[in-house]
Image (cartoon, grey):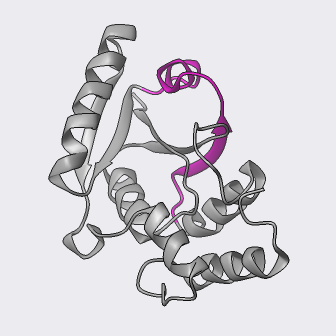
């Protein structure tokens, strides 16, 4: 039996912490769908299409990973694509409270989809998309946090004046 998992997020932008969780989840499950939420309630730096393109490049070498976008409730998307597992990443202890509540809410909405929390590699615990964007926007060094192609995309976006539009 194929076990499909979904790893949802805004991925704005994808960083090494996301990539760590995706690679490890891909070793556990037969298929992993890395799903870009197309309309989170936050100010986005990249469009959905740009985030998809960056994720596709970041996941290109992992054979059992697919990249897709979705809207609406994540648990409904997971059910729609036949995912049995939702993968989430934990960086720091403060993430646990939010992830715990979200997992319980999802369990209430659909008891057939399990949530699996993976703890990020210690090297990436300080990385968040918000941190990456803030440092990059202020001209700081982000090479330890993101692949070069993501840094290039951020720099182009900043130079064009279209970041967050």
Q: Quadrant of the N terminus?
A: top left
Residue 101 in which image quadrant: top left
Q: Position of residue 111 (x, y in %)?
A: 32, 11
Residue at horizontal 34%, vertical 43%? 88
Number of marks in the image?
0
Q: Position of residue 57 (x, y in %)?
A: 64, 68
| Residue 63 falls left or right of residue 144 | right
Q: Is residue 61 above or below residue 27?
A: below
Q: Is residue 30 above or below residue 74?
A: below
Compare residues 141 and 138 and report the one nearer the observer. 138
Residue at horizontal 37%, vertical 65%? 17
Compare residues 142 and 7 and report the one nearer the observer. 142
Work out which residue is located at the far front of the displayed protein and give it.
138
Residue 50 in which image quadrant: bottom right
Q: Position of residue 141 (x, y in %)?
A: 48, 90
Residue at horizontal 54%, vertical 59%? 63
Q: Which residues are magenta?
A: 62-83
Q: Any magenta on residue 68?
A: yes
Residue at horizontal 40%, vertical 53%? 26
Q: Any magenta on residue 111?
A: no
């Amino acid at each position: 039996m194929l076990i499909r998992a979904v790893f949802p997020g805004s991925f704005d932008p994808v960083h090494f912490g996301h990539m760590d969780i995706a690679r490890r989840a891909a070793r556990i499950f037969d298929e992993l769908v890395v799903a870009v939420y197309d309309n989170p309630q936050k100010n986005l730096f990249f469009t959905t299409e740009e985030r998809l393109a960056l994720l596709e490049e970041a996941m290109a070498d992992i054979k059992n990973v697919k990249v897709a976008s979705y809207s609406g409730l994540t648990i409904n998307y997971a059910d729609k694509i036949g995912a049995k597992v939702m993968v989430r990443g934990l960086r720091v202890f403060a993430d646990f409270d939010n992830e715990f509540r979200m997992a319980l809410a999802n369990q209430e909405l659909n008891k057939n989809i399990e949530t699996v929390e993976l703890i990020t590699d210690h090297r990436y615990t300080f990385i968040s998309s918000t941190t990456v964007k803030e440092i990059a926007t202020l001209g700081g060094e982000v090479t330890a946090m993101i692949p070069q192609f993501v840094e290039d995309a951020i720099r182009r976006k900043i130079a064009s004046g279209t970041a967050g539009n």
